[in-house]
Amino acid sequence: MIRRLIACALAPFSLLAAAPSPAPGVPASSTGDRVYALAGAWSCRSAAGALVRSTGVRDGDTVKVHYDVAGQDGKRSSFNDRYTFDPVKRNWHVSLGLAGFTADASPWLDDRWTIQGVDVNAVARRMTLALLPNGDFRRTLFYENGAKVFVLDMVERCAPGTSPPPADACIADSYPATTLEAGAVNARLVPRTPSPAVVQVVVSLNERSEIVATRVQSSPDPAFNGPALASVRASKFRTEIRNCKPIAADYIFSVTFGE
């Protein structure tokens, strides 16, 4: 079966910094609320290949976390999250720096914590933090699409300290194939077209997400095939993860000309 890849570059949506258990020297609250354990040093690896180091500090009932993100494409960024406990309402107000995601949530008392809110564009988002048996934790983010269905956006695994989980660790039980970086199209080689022209290219990836073969499946004109194949071969992908393992598979990548 041939699957379909999203034909655009996707920056890893990394809101990476939380902790399911107290970091060294940072006590949890007397009620067992794990949110206070967000303070400390944690290192994460996302299913999309991003590496993140987070540093959190506790100021009374507020936890502030700073993130430094290194994407697989070499790009770096940073942002901040803030968790503030309201003693009257007995809940947390959460503000995540990426996408302006805000939410209110009850205390984190179990191995799994879910919060739901909206981003700056009024798009509903959901975040789940799940404690893993070895003391790591998994963070999963979803967004609500136009059909009002929550869609998987990002998965990452975090470990205490300055070393992220190894590359062969189970970052996610399952994760869809992703385009990490779309290759540029050489405009000088593309014929003029009065309307958008779409070339469908089959991309074969091995379990290491390396391109092992490409072929044109459909095209409005053979003149577009060469530039389309060149663009695909210059792109970077991550193959599907299934049962914690990346799999070799064929995907369809769409290259659009004339937009």
Image (cartoon, rainbow, N blue to C red):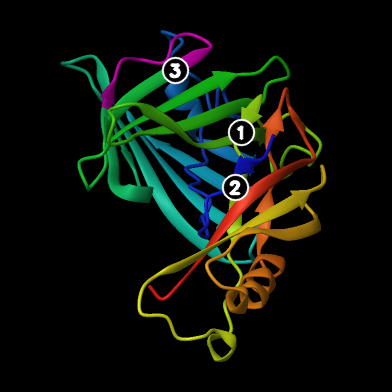
Q: Is residue 158 visible?
A: yes
Residue 233 position by quadrant: bottom right
Query: What residue is rendered at 71% in x and 54% in y?
Result: 203
Residue 46 is inside the magenta segment: no
Query: What residue is rendered at 51% in x and 30% in y?
Result: 140
Residue 105 position by quadrant: top left
Residue contact between numbered discs 2 and 1, judged by CB atoms under 8 Å: yes
Q: Nearer the viewer, residue 152 or 39?
A: 152
Side of 211 where 190 appears, left or right? left
Residue type at the position of mark 2: Thr
> Which range of residues does the magenta coloring cover?
104-113
Residue type at the position of mark 3: Trp
Where residue 129 appears, as percent x and y from the top left, is 50, 24
**In this rendering, the label closer to the viewer, 3 or 1:** 1
Disc on the earlier residue, 3 or 1: 3
Where residue 217 appears, as percent x and y from the top left, is 65, 55
Residue 110 is inside the magenta segment: yes
For label 3, the residue is: 113
Q: Residue furthest bottom?
A: 188
Query: What residue is rendered at 26% in x and 30% in y?
Result: 117
Residue type at the position of mark 1: Tyr
For label 2, the residue is: 178
Residue contact between numbered discs 3 and 1, judged by CB atoms under 8 Å: no
For label 1, the residue is: 175
> Crowding near pointer 3: few (<14 within 10 Å), some, many (20+)?
some
Disc on the earlier residue, 3 or 2: 3
Q: Residue furthest front?
A: 221
Q: Is residue 44 visible?
A: no
Answer above or below: position of 47 versus 31. Answer: below
